[in-house]
Amino acid sequence: MATEPIPTEPIPTGHVPTEHVPTEHVDVLIVGAGLSGIGAACHLRRNAPEKTYAVLEARGAIGGTWDLFRYPGVRSDSDMFTLGYAFRPWNEVTAIADGPSIRDYIRDTAREFGVDSKIRFHSRVIGAEWSTEIARWTVTVQQTETGDTVTMTCSWLSVCSGYYRYDAGHSPRFEGSELFGGRIVHPQHWPADLDHAGKRVVVIGSGATAVTLVPSMATEAAHVTMLQRTPSYVLSLPGTDPLAAVLRRRLPGRVAHPIVRWKNVLLTTASYQFSRRRPATMRALVRKGMLKALPPGFDVDTHFNPPYDPWDQRLCLVPDGDLFRALSSGKASVVTGRIERFTEDGIRLDDGQELAADIVVTATGLTLQALGGMSLTVDGRPVDLAETVSYKGMMVSGVPNFSMVIGYTNNSWTLKADLVNGYVVRLLRYLDEHGYASATPVGPDDDSATAPFLDLTSGYVQRGLAMLPRQGSRGPWRLRQNYLRDLLPMRRGRLDDEGMTFQPRRSAVPAPSPASTRFPAPSPAPVA
């Protein structure tokens, strides 16, 4: 595939006359500089060094989720030996890492592989239009610091922007909240000046964020109450991986890491499969663990006995049982009930109970957003993702040379991200070797593609399913959520299967339109 390298001469900042500046073209354009986007860039750098690429990041820093979330105790909800990249081992013995450590890991990876220089910060993709005639995407980008828009073209568009809105979490309206005399905050936008020492805190929610916040804030707060409408399954996991600690003392890191990584992949997969096949037994095992971790007489069946089966929603992991310790110490408590309204001094429940509070944290979830909010158009026709069918969980029917990364819901996000980003490199090579211009998935030839893209019952998933593709009943249109079953097909399987079509090259690509502007020179990656 012919490439047009990015010019090496300095590109001036400020106003650039548009009549003499061509549109910049890269082989691959990556949207997002978080865990997935940096991984995508590293896969290209390592396995397709001849390809030109750029990374567009709407915010001003590397890290994505792990740079955005700054609430107390923010940490991974998967073990770092699988959340880390396969090509760059996590070299600590800590299994559940805090947010700053994960952010540093992503930034260090970008620097080590030299992809940080390819990032264009404050660059939000608004839309992308595919032209079959020239086999290119024309991408419109807003520079968020100035509001200006610029365009560039690419042969392949890789969207690694996650699946939720960065600018707004889910914040339901609570009756009387305007009367509350304290402070209401959402974890997604944690105020740097918030001091909770000696304060009464109510955390609304029961998911991963809530079970992280409660023990973290309880160390300094007067008291923390976790107010939940519906309980979640909560499991304790060692904060430090015992096997990693032993192997690191006896074996080189390059040998120890794969052993620990595969141990965790297999354990997580086995736990999920056991939960789905024998939910009653798994429920009983989780309950037994809680009875052991919590003080005698604690009402486990009210506060930690969900009305749904294990893995209908993600299980919440707490390192070394820190949530249970906080509850046992009396510094924290759990209340299960429904909010009637806020009052000047706190929250009143529909059973009449009142919870006094100085600070209320609304850990009420995410707001799903497909493709970072960008629009797609193919040959003048807008793409409605809800009308498309997912192909291998990474492409969608009828959209050429396009991929998106959405990680596993029952395992570490990065396991799927690595598979997708590696598959894209394979597909790019296949196009070059066979002289094709594009690869376009097609849906199944029957009416079987009716299943939702994600099978979780979590509120944030159910609220956003209408904006995601559908999936089919069989491969390659079925999203299996199973790393072990995906591994060989994604790494070694056929690229020319029944779900994929390839288009030949047409005439030579015309010169880019001069009526465009070019990006200012990339700024250096921010230092943590």
Image (cartoon, grey):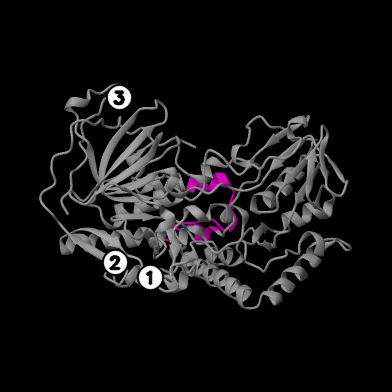
Mark 2: secondary structure: strand
Q: Is residue 40 above or below residue 390?
A: above
Q: Earlier in the sequence, mark 1 or mark 2?
A: 1
Q: The residue tagged with tag 1: helix, strand or loop?
A: loop
Which residue: 86% across, 61% down? Answer: 298
Label 1 Cα neighbours within 10 Å, binned few <14 / some 14-19 / many ≥20: many
Q: Nearer the viewer, mark 2 or mark 3?
A: 2
Q: Do the residues under discs 1 and 2 have CB atoms within 8 angstroms?
A: yes
Q: Amino acid at mark 1?
A: Pro
Q: Give yes or no for residue 96 being in the magenta stretch.
A: yes
Secondary structure found at label 3: loop
- Residue 500: mark in rendering: 2
Q: Nearer the viewer, residue 236 or 112?
A: 236
In which image quadrant can residue 447 be found?
bottom left
- Magenta extent: 80-105
In whole angstroms, how far apart are the C-alphas of marks 1 and 2?
A: 9 Å
